[in-house]
Amino acid sequence: MKTKAAVLWEVNAPWSVEEIELDAPGPGEVLVKIAASGMCHSDEHLTTGDLPFALPIVGGHEGAGVVEQVGEGVSWIAPGDHVVFGFIPSCGRCPSCSTGHQNLCDLGALMGLGLQISDGTSRHHAQGKDLTLMCMLGTFAHHTVVNEASCIKIEKDVPLDKACLLGCGVVTGWGSAVYAADVTPGDTVVVVGVGGIGANAIQGAKIAGAKRIVAIDPVEFKREKAMEFGATHTVSSMAEALPFLQELTWGTMANKVIMTMGVGDGQLMGEAMALAAKRGRVVVTNIHPAFEMGGANMSLLDLTLMEKQLVGSLFGSGNPRADIPKLLGMYREGQLDLDGLVTNTYTLDDINQGYQDMRDGKNIRGVLVYE
């Protein structure tokens, strides 16, 4: 079949919205008509080369839609079912999945190749070439074919233009606070960067019972939105946050610091660690450029003498098959704000404008909504 998709043909080029050819799903695969896709900063990392995935590539890894066709051997989802894509597939059988760490499923090792899990080939084609898929999903398209390991079935009453955000940003941010940082009641929490992930880290910290949540962002609009999501204080930089926290906490500093900037910078890690209290934990969730070789600028003596912790977090250290339905249930009950995350919506043809708005700091999260 023919469908429409946004393709990145080379680094530092705009997204090319064009017609592509899509093959039928093979064994273990699913054809989905996508209703909406979140515009995550990770797809911007493709255009800058910070994520050196194979090109040409159909972008997009936050998506939700309706199943139209299933391949041989797929028995648990059927045409008409609503699904959210998990940007890391989960097989349920590897050591990580079987010990409750679906975010680290062994199938994630194939993400950079962007081909079908089942046979390593492509179902997407354009201009006589095979196309790869961002996170083996390619949600910047009206239709896509993915492996069943990437699908999470959801209730049909959930708006798909909100559900798509659970494919990455919401679970990643919320889990960075609740799981990776292990925020507990009474904690002082710092969130560095208030985009789609940082906003949800704030929500997670609030739900977990943090006493103070300090949001750091240079953009005034984002600082204002941070207060709506549950921040108690805001500042414009980590340098400004240091004396502010010293006064706010009587010198004890933050129990948890969560790094959710658009692009990580190892030279800022020293500042992040300085914001942490004794036995404080710094969680690095934001993506750093793959070829960042300068290392992290930080005091390892401080790490030892103050027993500080530095940990990484992928997909919020969560289990998407459990956490996506759980968080959608919290949205239904009014405990989690998904509506406020969506600043602007765009058509697929407007994708480049949407990413320019992200660069200009105008969006918490932009969403592509398809016909």
Image (cartoon, rainbow, N blue to C red):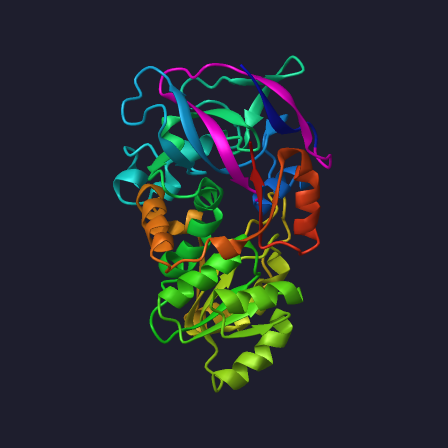
Residue at the spot 66% in from the left edge and 44% down from the top edge = 354
Would you say 132 lies left or right of 327 here? right
Please determine whether, in this image, residue 24 is positioned above or below residue 341. Answer: above
Question: What is the x, y in percent for residue 125?
Answer: 59, 17
Residue that extends furthest to the right in the rendered view of this protein: 13
Query: Which residue is more in the foreground, 79 or 147?
Result: 79
Query: Which residue is more in the foreground, 17 or 90?
Result: 17
Residue at the spot 29% in from the left edge and 34% down from the top edge = 92
Residue at the spot 61% in from the left edge and 46% down from the top edge = 289
Q: Does residue 86 belong to the magenta stretch?
A: no
Query: Which quadrant holds residue 130?
Result: top right
Q: Does residue 29 belong to the magenta stretch?
A: yes
Residue 306 visible here:
no
Residue at the spot 32% in from the left edge and 24% down from the top edge = 78
Please determine whether, in this image, residue 257 is positioned above or below residue 57. Answer: below
Question: What is the x, y in percent for residue 119?
Answer: 43, 17
Please determine whether, in this image, residue 233 is positioned above or below residue 51. Answer: below
Tell me the quadrant of the picture where the C terminus can be found.
top right
What stretch of residues is rendered in magenta? 11-39
Query: Which residue is more in the foreground, 18 or 177?
Result: 18
